[in-house]
Image (spheres, rainbow, N blue to C red):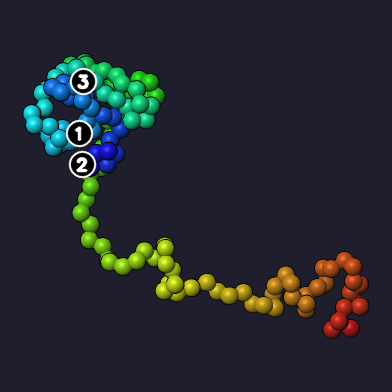
Amino acid sequence: MCKHILNAQVAIRAPCCKKFFDCPQCHEESQDHPLRKTMEMAFMCKKCKKAFRKDMTTYEESDEYCPHCDNHYVIEAKEPQAMIGVEGEDARIDARMIKDDRVRENPQRSLFAQKDVSDKIDTPLWELPGRT
């Protein structure tokens, strides 16, 4: 898992040490030699876990997709951003301090209220209490 590019779709094989890395920074941090450049690159798709090669001299727009699962791997990179946030507990976990803004229902307008039972079938309307 790459800490530099959060949405890496493929791992790239470094031609110098024959190991797969998500980005050049990962190679630089873990290896003691510089990354060798090449025009034929080997990729491993993170969706289908299959490897494939691409020739960078004849790279086209259709080459932006994995040939096995059609995963679009050339996308804009999402890098981690430093954020300033309010410290405290997550309101989604502990919601005791959040005011409940919902409106309570009038108890006389309930389905189970005794005053409005005119839709009941088993009791005739003239025998209902409070009706004359």
Residue 124: % across, % down? 91, 72
Q: Are marks 3 and 2 in contact (CB under 8 Å)?
A: no
Task: Give amino acid for label 3.
Answer: Met
Task: Give amino acid for label 1.
Answer: Cys
Residue on which the image places disc 1: 23
Secondary element at image label 3: strand
Residue 117 position by quadrant: bottom right
Residue 48: % across, % down? 38, 27
Q: Quadrant of the C terminus?
A: bottom right
Left or right position of 109 against 27? right
Residue shown at the point (27%, 38%) measured from the top left? 1
Mark 2: few, some, or many residues within 10 Å (few <14, many ≥20)? some
Residue 130: % across, % down? 84, 84
Residue shown at the point (15%, 32%) measured from the top left? 27
Left or right position of 28 against 106? left
Res. 4 mark: 2
Q: Is residue 96 something that shows in the picture?
A: yes
**N-terminal-most mark, 1 or 2:** 2
Secondary element at image label 1: loop
Q: Are marks 1 and 2 in contact (CB under 8 Å)?
A: yes
Residue on which the image places disc 3: 41
**N-terminal-most mark, 3 or 1:** 1
Q: Is residue 76 above or below residue 105?
A: above
Task: Give amino acid for label 2.
Answer: His
Residue shown at the point (23%, 47%) measured from the top left? 80
Res. 120 mark: none
